Amino acid sequence: MARTAVVFGAGWEGRLVDAGEPALDSAAQIVEDGQRRRIPVSDDGSHGRPAGYARDRIHTERGRDELGPYRDVGSDAETPDGFAYPLALELGTAPHRIESQGDYPLRSDKGEVFGRVVNHPGTQPYPWCRAALQDLAGRVL
């Protein structure tokens, strides 16, 4: 009975993983473009930032860990107090209490006075990020 042995040269795993990088970059670009098309954009911005601030912060970061290469795609926009609001757009928010951080009442962008405490009703989810992943469905990269 004849035998056949397959022997791989040194470094073959790294070369195989590296061969997938262009497809991974293409997939990340498709998702990034889909996120830019779908993320909600306010007409007037918020917290003194221009309309489209979260959209304009969408980017792709390249990385590699013990499982191999990966791409993180999303928006790193935050409110002035450090809240990652693109995540709240994606998942929605539960009802929550908002309190003034000083001796002044909370106000709308148009100057409407709400008081020192507001019971916010929460927001509905708007799956802009997950929907962009669907743009990869059925593609061969």
Image (spheres, rainbow, N blue to C red):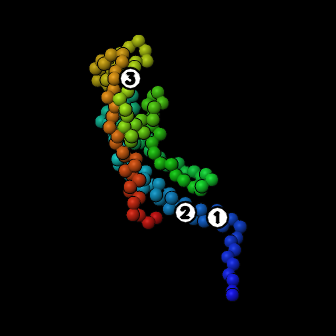
- The answer to whether one can see residue 21 in this image is yes
Disc ID at residue 20: 2
Dot 3: element: strand
Q: Is residue 76 above or below residue 82?
A: below
Report x, y in % for residue 116. 36, 16
Dot 2: element: loop
Q: Is residue 91 above or below residue 47?
A: below
The tag earlier along the polypeptide, 3 or 2, is: 2
Q: Nearer the viewer, mark 2 or mark 1?
A: 1
Residue under the point 69% across and 86% down: 2
Quarter holding residue 29: bottom left
Q: Is residue 65 above or below residue 115?
A: below
How much space separates mark 2 and mark 1, taking CA atoms?
A: 11 Å
Residue under the point 68% across and 65% down: 11
Residue under the point 61% across and 51% down: 65
Report x, y in % for residue 50. 37, 34
How much space separates mark 3 and mark 1, taking CA atoms?
A: 52 Å
Q: Tell me if 12 is positioned left or right of 57 in this view.
A: right
In this orientation, which residue lies closer to the viewer: 133 or 28?
A: 133
Disc ID at residue 13: 1
- Find disc 3 in the rendering and name its residue: 98
**Type of residue at label 2?**
Gly
Report x, y in % for residue 70. 54, 53
**Type of residue at label 3?**
Ile
**Type of residue at label 1?**
Glu
Mark 1 crowd level (few <14, some 14–19, many ≥20, 10 Å Cα):
few
Indicate the quadrant containing the N terminus: top left, top right, bottom left or bottom right.
Answer: bottom right
Q: Furthest-right residue in view? A: 10
Dot 1: element: helix
Mark 3 crowd level (few <14, some 14–19, many ≥20, 10 Å Cα):
few
